[in-house]
Amino acid sequence: MTTSAASSTGTPDTTDSPDAPSSDTTARRGPGWLPWAALGVVYLVWGSTYLGIRFTITSMPALLSAGLRFLLAGVLLTVIVLVFSGPSALRMSLPEFGTAALGGVLLPALGNGIVVIAQFQVASGLAALLVACVPLYVVVLRRASGERPPWITFAGVGLGLAGLAVLLLGGSSSAGTHGSAWWGPWLVLLAAAFWATGSFATTKLPVPANPFALSAVQMVVGGVVLSAGGLVSGERIDFAAITPSSWIAWIYLVTFGSLLAFSSYVYALGTLPVSTVATYAYVNPVIAVVLGVLLAKESFDLVQLAGGALVLVAVVLVVRAERRSRRAVITESSPVEGTVSG
């Protein structure tokens, strides 16, 4: 973790902030379009994982199915990194491994695991709507750490939450897989807090140079924690009771939800502003609600359509604001156009 210095003009040097990736990170992120493509994968795929979880837990134990999902995806990604980048890509210092392990606990284990449990009581579309508070948590964390996000970022978050409120008020009353207990939505909000904290922490702490090695460690650690939690709580797998739809959903979660989308998320988080990456939480609910209508018979009306439109406008506002802020930071710190320190 680096400490921001001050330039000779007295302006804080924010080049190490999560909204202005370091030159080392920029150098290894590849083509300029690749981070945005990765974020696009997160936008599209993670919106469908809520429905995948709904179908999975109808006949599979919640924590064990989630744990084995991440564990298998993490092992597969480790093999892929070894084959294409060699053993050196997996080397990391103890602090870097500590960050990866912490991310595994906060993101897959607590962030995703709690959502899986909550979906017994919360419909898939509603769960996605509640998780959309992640950008609000991120902005609060940034402000608490001393950063000053541009005002338009707060405006975008506010508009996004307004859109989500419209979606929620006009949304489906469908219950979760097995019920609709009052504590279900609160569990989702708690999971979102863990996810936001993990996402923010990985932009502040030292991480492995290879983002896919980071993702592999996070998924393996998260998978181990979730699986251990399932075994301790008494969960056991009854293969004879697992339905074909649960198998299909679980395989989809392993390959697309974890291996592809989670790796894309970690990559995007290391190369794009954290508030920009967090906008996936605005798009995912729209996709989740639409899929709920088509595949799980959850209701969707014109009021929800209006809310979805507000959400998409919020995404545009936040992304544009963060990109402008980032360009301003680069301009201020440039040896050519800015003031040379020292």
Image (cartoon, rainbow, N blue to C red):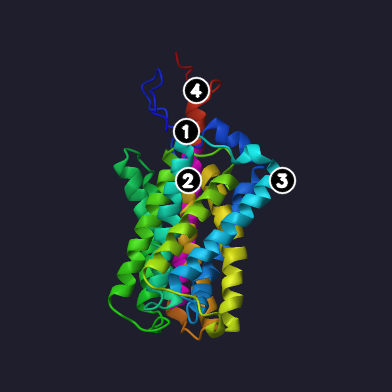
Q: Specify whether residue 66 is painted magenta.
A: no
Identified by mark 2, the residue type is Ala
Residue in front for this viewpoint, 252 or 185? 252
Sequence order check, earlier mark of 3 and 2: 3
Rendered view: 134 above or below 166: above
Q: Is residue 67 left or right of residue 34?
A: left
Nearest the eye: 140 or 46: 46
Question: Which segment did they paint magenta?
Answer: 304-326
Proximity of marks 4 and 3: CB atoms separated by less than 8 Å: no
Give residue 84's mark: 3
**Sequence order check, earlier mark of 1 and 3:** 3
Q: Who is closer to the viewer here, 157 or 129?
A: 129
Residue count near mark 1 (Cα–Cα under 10 Å), binned few <14, some 14–19, many ≥20: some
Disc 2 crowd, CA 10 A, few/some/many (<14, 14-19, 20+)? many
Q: Secondary structure at mark 3?
A: helix
For the C terminus, give its image quadrant.
top left
